[in-house]
Image (cartoon, helix red, strand yellow):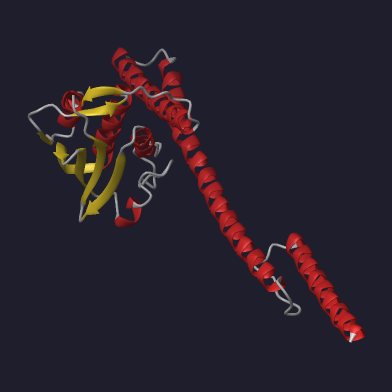
Amino acid sequence: MLLIIIGILVSKLCKYQSQIRHIEKELSMLKREDTNYRLSSYCHIGKTEEVIILFNDILEDYRKEMMRLKRENCAYRESITSISHDIRTPLTSAKGYLQMLAHDAVSEDKKHGYIMIVEQRVNNVTNMLNQLFEYARVEAGEMEFTSEHLNVTNLFIDTISMFYDDFLEKDCEPVIEAVDTPLYIKGDRSAVVRIMENLIKNALVHGTDEYYFALKKQENRVILSFSNKTDSIEERDVERIFDRFYTTDISRTRKTTGLGLAIVKQFVHQMGGEVCAELQEDIFIVRVEFPCEEV
């Protein structure tokens, strides 16, 4: 009987060793080769099946994470290339006009026109670099947000009024709807103004008509709504609209970095709010919500 028991134990031990060698061999192969291969079982014994299942689950999670990182890295490199092009193009143009200004044969009227163009190109580059710097600081957690009671009604009206000339240039007037009584939220004044500015700028860049900006209160939430008619945003864009560097302007003729809405999302979340976007036929809508504060 003792010999039988010893024989059974030795047999199991041999099976365990064979299973371990089999797993070791497959893991070594996985280390050498980039493959979707999954670990298999050499012999069904003890808890080794559960260990193999656990290994395969870990491998699957690892592969998914690697695929995500590859996609993000590819998108990041493409975005850097696009941003570099966006910055280089106006600088090259400005350099060309500066060279023309050096010619004595250029009339004073043309010189004035060239100077205006150079100034515009430099401003475009400055705005792009400012957005890049601002987003980098927010993502790195280097921006400090204050927390104070803000009259968002006044901020809403004041911010929209800053863009009066911009809407005149587009020969349109936005519909503005705001509550009569002051609404208060808790947050950083500069960040809240920046959120509104970015959403209005986004509407001006990508919108074509039917601009509608609203400030309302629903239950205990303050809701800011910015909508406009668009011909450049599609349903497939909505789920990525807040991603960094994402732009629906494939040709990148609108001189945007694709960071405006990404900054909005970061700022809103930093102050405990929520932001979402949707497309209703050809009307693009962004809603920002903050908890309403009583004063």
Nearer to me, 111 or 280: 280
| Residue 94 to residue 49: above or below | above
Q: In this view, does 227 lie to the left or right of 4?
A: left
Residue 4 left/right relative to 175: right
On the rendered image, what quadrant is the C terminus found in? Answer: top left
| Residue 105 versus residue 210 in the image, above or below | above
- Relative to 273, does residue 118 appear above or below in the rendering? above
Q: Quadrant of residue 221?
A: top left
- Tell me if I can see residue 37 in this picture: no
Nearer to me, 189 or 34:
189
Image quarter in which the N terminus is found: bottom right
- Residue sticking out furthest to the front: 1
- Indicate the position of residue 31 as horizontal and vertical percent values: 75, 60
Specify the farthest residue to the right. 3
Q: Which residue is drawn at 52% across and 40% down?
A: 81
Q: Residue 159: percent from the left, percent from the top? A: 21, 25
